[in-house]
């Protein structure tokens, strides 16, 4: 058996082995380049992965049934408004955006103006993580989100990177934090609805079933 045949045989044996599951403690930080992160996401399509501006990979745990239903509700309301309004494109929680600071984030729901989406110069930019920050973002805090501070930092980053309006919805506390460019964060306590203001004219999110129930 020549050297090439032996090497192929070893490779075949490795491929035939069952995969080993890797548990990553919270204190361990894995880093990847932008290109490697894209490959990692391609090889793990069932995982929701995000990447910080310093290259640290974050794995978002699956949501509970209750959080999933709330997320579906708010996304559906955004989609229905966007179809009527026709000035932009809505996105769900599976969409990743490469922010100007180099981070790759996936808001629970988001919206981008048509002219910004159409300004993407290549099909590759559309097919990969879009190199822009959405004009509007929503993050929905789930029971698995132990650190609200981390979500607040993420929301502020969206605004710093170009989002004009953002909502951090926290059903466990009954609050909504509203983020706007150049203005202090506004905290609303158990509001019945939320207005899209001048960013999403005419959009009103009904919070029944999202913030309540």
Image: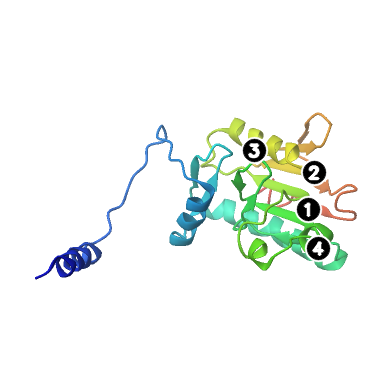
Which of disc 1 and disc 3 is earlier in sequence? 3
Q: Nearer the viewer, residue 149 or 122?
A: 122
| Disc 1 element | strand
Give the left or right position of residue 181, taking residue 72 as reference.
right
* Residue name at image x 62 percent, y 37 percent: 151
Indicate which label's residue lies in the foreground, 1 or 2: 2
* Residue name at image x 77 percent, y 43 percent: 162
* Residue name at image x 43 percent, y 40 percent: 30
Inter-mark Cα distance, 4 to 1: 15 Å
Inter-mark Cα distance, 3 to 4: 24 Å
What residue is disc 1 on?
A: 206
Which of disc 1 and disc 4 is earlier in sequence? 4
* Residue name at image x 51 percent, y 50 percent: 49
Q: Residues within 10 Å of mark 4 (few under 14, many from 20)?
A: some
The disc at residue 154 is 3
The disc at residue 165 is 2
| Disc 2 element | strand
Which of disc 2 and disc 1 is earlier in sequence? 2
Circle 4/circle 1 CB separation < 8 Å = no
Indicate which label's residue lies in the foreground, 3 or 1: 3
Circle 3/circle 4 CB separation < 8 Å = no
Inter-mark Cα distance, 2 to 3: 13 Å
Give the left or right position of residue 111, taking residue 124 as reference.
right
Indicate which label's residue lies in the foreground, 3 or 4: 3
> Residue 96, percent across and down?
61, 54
Is 101 located above or below residue 204 in the figure?
above
């Amino acid at each position: 058996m020549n050297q090439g045949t032996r090497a192929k045989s070893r490779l075949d044996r490795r491929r035939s082995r069952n995969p080993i599951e890797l548990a990553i403690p919270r204190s361990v930080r894995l880093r990847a380049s932008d290109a490697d992160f894209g490959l990692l996401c391609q090889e793990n399509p069932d995982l929701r992965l995000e990447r910080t501006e310093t290259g640290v990979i974050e794995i978002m745990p699956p949501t509970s049934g209750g959080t999933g239903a709330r997320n579906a509700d708010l996304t559906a309301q955004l989609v229905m408004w966007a179809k009527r309004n026709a000035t932009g494109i809505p996105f769900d929680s599976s969409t990743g955006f490469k922010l100007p600071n180099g981070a790759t984030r996936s808001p629970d729901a988001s919206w981008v103006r048509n002219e910004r989406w159409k300004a993407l110069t290549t099909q590759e930019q559309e097919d990969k993580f879009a190199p822009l920050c959405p004009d509007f973002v929503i993050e929905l805090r789930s029971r698995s989100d132990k650190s609200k501070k981390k979500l607040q930092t993420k929301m502020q980053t969206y605004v710093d990177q170009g989002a004009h309006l953002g909502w951090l919805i926290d059903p466990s506390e009954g609050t909504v934090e509203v983020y706007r460019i150049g203005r202090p964060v506004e905290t609303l306590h158990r509001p019945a609805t939320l207005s899209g203001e001048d960013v999403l004219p005419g959009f009103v999110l009904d919070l029944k079933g999202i913030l309540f129930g």
